[in-house]
Every structure is written in structure tokens, then in C-alpha cells.
Amino acid sequence: MPAEAALCIWDAMTQSFVHAIVQAQPRKVIHVIRVVDDVLTLAEVHELAERMRQHALSRYGNQAADVVVVQGGSKETLRLFGDPHSVTRVRAAMFNATVSWTPIELE
């Protein structure tokens, strides 16, 4: 593994995240990961989404988890990454204050 990749993984492990689930359809959910007090690069966002997919597979048995990564502290700086349909659903849920965040540790 290149040194840059190892550094990227180490940085992501020292950051803190919170997790929420947004109902997309009756039997489908969107896993939402919010980055707390930090800004990630696009590569780190993709790595975080993949780590969440692995977590969803091991914990919930979700084979192809839909993941949205949220970062930013205010409406002006808020950025959402993921499938456009999922991002729209998550943005609406956040706007309506129906998202309940819980701390999560991703390996």
C-alpha cells in the first residue's frame, strides 16, 4: 500500500462520524454518514462511503448499501455526496429534521 493511501486511511480513522438511516422505500434505507468537525477530500469521501458499505454488509446484511456522506457545519457549507436520488431524499429529511444522528466507529 502506498504511503499516501496509508496516511489517508489513518486520517479517516482519527476523525469522528455520526450515522443516521433515512427510509428511501418501504424496504430500502439510505445510510447517512456525517463528518464531524472536518472536511474530507473527494478520495476520502469515497473511501468513507465504501467503509460504510462494508459495515452495512457485516452488520445489516445489506449487499449494496446506499450511502450518502454529509460534511459541513452550516447550510452554506453543507455538501452531500452520493447517488443524486439518495442525496435528494437525505436533504429533504435533514430539512424536515427527521434525521436522528448516532455516533459510529468505522473500521
Image: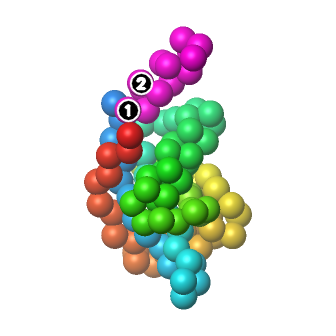
In the rendered structure, which amino acid carries the disc numbered 1?
Met
Name, please, the residue furthest toward the bottom.
Answer: 26
Tell me which residue sits at (29%, 60%) in the image.
102
Nearest to the observer: residue 71 or residue 64: 64
In the rendered structure, which amino acid carries the disc numbered 2?
Trp
Quadrant where the C terminus is found in the figure: top left
Q: Residue 89: within the magenta? A: no
CB within 8 Å, label 1 to label 2: yes
Q: Residue 4: within the magenta? A: yes
Name, please, the residue furthest toward the left.
Answer: 103
- The residues tagged by marks 1 and 2 sit, at their Cα atoms, a distance apart of 5 Å
User: Can I make out residue 21 in this image?
Assistant: yes
The part of the image, by quadrant, that contains residue 101 is bottom left
Name, please, the residue furthest toward the top.
Answer: 3
User: Can I make out residue 36 in this image?
Assistant: no
Residue under label 1, please give it.
13
Mark 1 burial class by Cα count in 10 Å: few <14, some 14-19, many 20+: some
Name, please, the residue furthest toward the right.
Answer: 84
Nearest to the observer: residue 56 or residue 7: 56
**Residue 39 rendering spot, x and y as whole percentages:** 49, 36
Residue under label 2, please give it.
10
**Residue 66 rendering spot, x and y as whole percentages:** 59, 63
Q: Which residues are magenta?
A: 1-13
